[in-house]
Amino acid sequence: MFESNCVADVETLMCHNPAHHDVICPVVHPLVHYSAQSLCKDFMLLNGAIPSIATGWQLWWHEQLNEYLRQLDVGVKPHCSLDHEKDVVLCGQDIGDLPTTYTVQNLFPHELPVIGTYVDRRIVPGFTYTIRVLSSKRNLFAGNPMLLQSVGCGYGKRIAFKGPTLNHNTNYFYSDSHATGCAFSIVAVGSGDHFIVMDSAGHAVGQAIIDCVESQKEVSSHVTPDGSVEKRINVVFSVLIQYSCQPNGKLSLFSDKVVEAVGIVVMLKVKRAAEASVIRLEQVMLPHFGMCSFEPIQKSTK
């Protein structure tokens, strides 16, 4: 009886919220499309007991929906392609540089511009980027993620990346090398990265292996009192979850599965360090466990 009431409640919410119809379903487990009936079953598994009245379900549902929509406001909306190119006017004086003005075209929301003398202040040595020539689909360095080593000064700023050797590094270009400009996209995590899955109580419940990453967008960056640089990157990705054994030694009740998810990667570049580190991947909603965080098995750098 309760389950049928829950299904009706979910379907009612969907009908009354047409503007958010495509995000209602993934609220409990972002990006994982469930029917209303499946959502109710997952809710009961997640809470370990069946609530006595549907009102409790409705209250919980609205809380989850509001939290998920809040996350969308600072990140990339799940299941939307990054196809909203736009033209942006850049002023050098806004970043304390030369008094120049440029208009760059076809810039995606997650990209950071470089053109002429202008280099976006969020582009920081020690972090990894892919680089696209604006107004084209051509990627520099064969589209490979490149660790930024330095950004020079002056008019045409030399932008250098880590190369295969120290003596002869050809992995560089100048900020004015391309008339239409370049777009930098930050790379925080990638396919094959391993993490330990921690539930909201801080217990390890399994391992996570990144399958593929759909999008990565920087949402904040600041310098800490000790001179370190901390960045937070919104990521949309699919991941293989391998659940651990239960504390009593019995096999997990849940089978390994690949799920789609969103999360926030926290990265830190310590002062004088050559490369930033992934500290954790947080705010990841998983089936059966709710909100989780991923801790790198090895504090690998990106």
Image (cartoon, grey):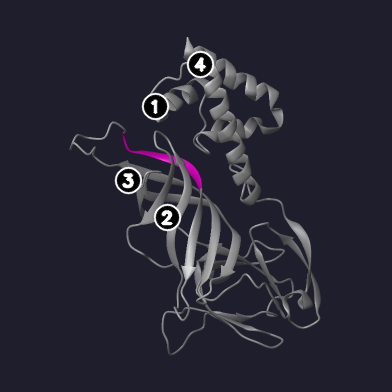
| Circle 4/circle 1 CB separation < 8 Å | no
x and y percent of residue 126 in the render? 50, 74
Residue furthest out toward the left: 249
Residue nearer the viewer, 210 or 249? 249
Tag 2 residue: 191
The disc labelled 4 sits on which kind of residue?
Answer: Ile
Mark 2 Cα shell of 10 Å, populated few (<14), some (14-19), many (≥20): few
Residue occupied by mark 1: 45
Q: Where are the magenta residues, as a range?
A: 255-262
N-term-proximal mark, 4 vs 2? 4
Q: Amino acid at mark 3?
A: His
- The residue that mark 3 highlights is 203
Q: Which residue is mark 4?
A: 53
Q: CA distance from mark 4 to mark 1?
A: 16 Å
The label nearer to you, 3 versus 2, is 3
Q: CA distance from mark 2 to mark 1?
A: 30 Å
* Residue 79 horizontal side relative to residue 47, left or right: right
Residue 137 pos. (x, y %): 64, 61
First along the sequence among labels 4 and 1 = 1
Q: Amino acid at mark 2?
A: Ser
Give the mark nearer the N terminus: 3 vs 4.
Answer: 4
Q: Up-down: is 228 above or below 34?
A: below
